[in-house]
């Protein structure tokens, strides 16, 4: 244990002397959180909207006021005919066009169904779908009020209620996922480069002549990154709460414990990569392009797994980030406990143990 402690102290001292490593371990996670937290926002507000009012009656102006009075639409111009809509959408000056047909006021006064058309720019599918949904809701409410002026008819009223994220803020969905990506960077890519660095600068030759065993060298190199990973976890959780207002409804202690199980996976992958490459550049390229990017894409952090082809859905079961993403959103948003997250905990523990065993079997205290 004394020899192991000496290796751990040596690794901390080496990290302190590396001026490039400390910013990557501390400042890097903060920058990633702020950048992704503010940039990855799928909420659709202030949609640039073009108005084509061919009726120009009090009834049509009332409908227009419904659009302009909401926080979802921003009127950017008006035209007289639908032929003039396309230039607005092509140039990007407008994303949505509301066309109120002539005779809208007369049809409404007569109790008939007036016509309203909404034209959306489908090149941005998310904004188009959300914008059409908002517009449909406004038109439906206006239609319900018009039908209320005639003899009343029985109708079904839908009263929606959203749990865990009542305002449907996409930021609450994406910000916790930053923690999984930061830990991938800190505890997979950087450890693999740090171990390979011993080969490049020649210090591994000095370690070989010491009485250290392979497991002592391996554990001694990984423990500092475990400590840094847990520190980054606390740092990101604090910033997520204070800066972005994402609630932490579950147990912080449980989150730290399950994060430790996640670190077994990322550290195991980093150590395994270090046994397969010979330079830091190879380690970085291998981790970033062959492991990190596919793991993020297929984990469900960004894209729903249910929308992926079936073969990729099966592949996602072998990705630790998938289970840790469920842990993060379960603890942050739903307040889930271990009684709910035990399958993810067992899977992370099993996969992490397997990766560390495979990496340790390949790890040799040698220059080869």
Image (cartoon, helix red, strand yellow):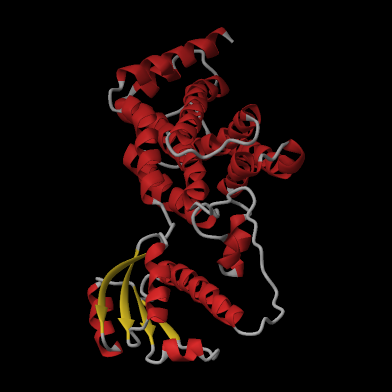
Choose between 295 and 167: the one closer to the eye: 167
Farthest-out residue, right: 339
Is residue 320 rendered to the left or right of residue 239? right
> Residue 29 occupies which quadrant of the picture?
top left
- Where does the image place residue 298, in percent across and percent down from the top left? 53, 57
Q: Is residue 199 visible?
A: no
Q: Is residue 127 above or below residue 194?
A: below
Asked if one can make out residue 144 in the rendered structure from this viewpoint, the answer is yes
Q: Is residue 80 left or right of residue 259?
A: left
Give above or below for 118 relative to 273.
below
Please state the horizontal and vertical placement of residue 64, each as a whole percent of the image. 38, 73
**On screen, residue 296 above or below 12:** below
At x 60%, y 64%, the residue is: 306
Who is closer to the viewer here, 37 or 164?
164
* Number of marks present in the image shown: 0
Residue 32: x and y in percent read: 37, 40
Quarter of the image where the N terminus is located: top right
Apparent side of residue 337 relative to residue 90 in the rendered image (left or right): right
Q: Residue at x 46, y 88 (%)?
A: 115
Q: Nearer the viewer, residue 107 or 348?
A: 107
Q: Residue at x 47, y 48 (%)?
A: 171
Figure quadrant of residue 247:
top right
Q: Is residue 141 above or below residue 249?
A: below
Quarter of the picture holding the C terminus: top left
Say which of 122 and 64 sits in front: 64
């Amino acid at each position: 244990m004394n020899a192991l402690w000496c290796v751990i102290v040596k690794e901390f001292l080496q990290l302190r002397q590396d001026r490039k490593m400390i910013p990557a371990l501390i400042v890097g996670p903060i920058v990633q959180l702020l950048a992704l937290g503010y940039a990855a926002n799928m909420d659709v507000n202030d949609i640039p909207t073009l108005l084509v009012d061919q009726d120009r009656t009090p009834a049509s102006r009332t409908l227009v006021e419904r659009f302009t009075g909401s926080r979802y639409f921003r009127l950017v111009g008006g035209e007289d005919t639908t032929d003039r809509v396309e230039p607005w959408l092509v140039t990007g000056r407008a994303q949505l066009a509301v066309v109120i047909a002539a005779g809208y006021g007369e049809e409404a006064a007569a109790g008939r169904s007036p016509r309203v058309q909404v034209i959306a720019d489908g090149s941005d599918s998310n904004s188009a779908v959300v914008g059409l949904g908002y517009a449909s809701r406004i038109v439906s409410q206006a239609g319900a009020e018009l039908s209320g002026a005639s003899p009343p008819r029985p109708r079904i009223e839908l009263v929606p209620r959203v749990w865990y994220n009542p305002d449907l803020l996409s930021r609450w969905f994406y910000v916790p996922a930053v923690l999984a990506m930061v830990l991938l960077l800190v505890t997979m890519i950087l450890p693999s480069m740090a171990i390979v660095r011993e080969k490049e600068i020649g210090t591994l030759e000095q370690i070989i002549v010491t009485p250290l065993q392979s497991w002592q060298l391996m554990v001694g190199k990984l423990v500092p990154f475990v400590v840094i990973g847990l520190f980054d976890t606390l740092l990101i959780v604090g910033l997520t709460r204070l800066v972005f207002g994402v609630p932490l409804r579950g147990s912080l202690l449980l989150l730290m414990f399950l994060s430790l199980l996640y670190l077994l996976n990322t550290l195991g992958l980093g150590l395994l990569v270090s046994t397969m490459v010979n330079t830091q550049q190879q380690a970085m390229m291998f981790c970033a392009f062959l492991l990190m990017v596919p793991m993020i894409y297929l984990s469900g952090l960004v894209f729903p797994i249910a929308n992926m082809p079936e073969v990729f859905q099966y592949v996602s079961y072998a990705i630790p980030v998938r289970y840790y993403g469920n842990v993060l959103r379960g603890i942050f948003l739903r307040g889930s406990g271990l009684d709910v997250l035990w399958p993810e905990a067992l899977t992370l523990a099993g996969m992490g143990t397997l990766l560390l065993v495979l990496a340790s079997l390949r790890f040799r205290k040698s220059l080869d």
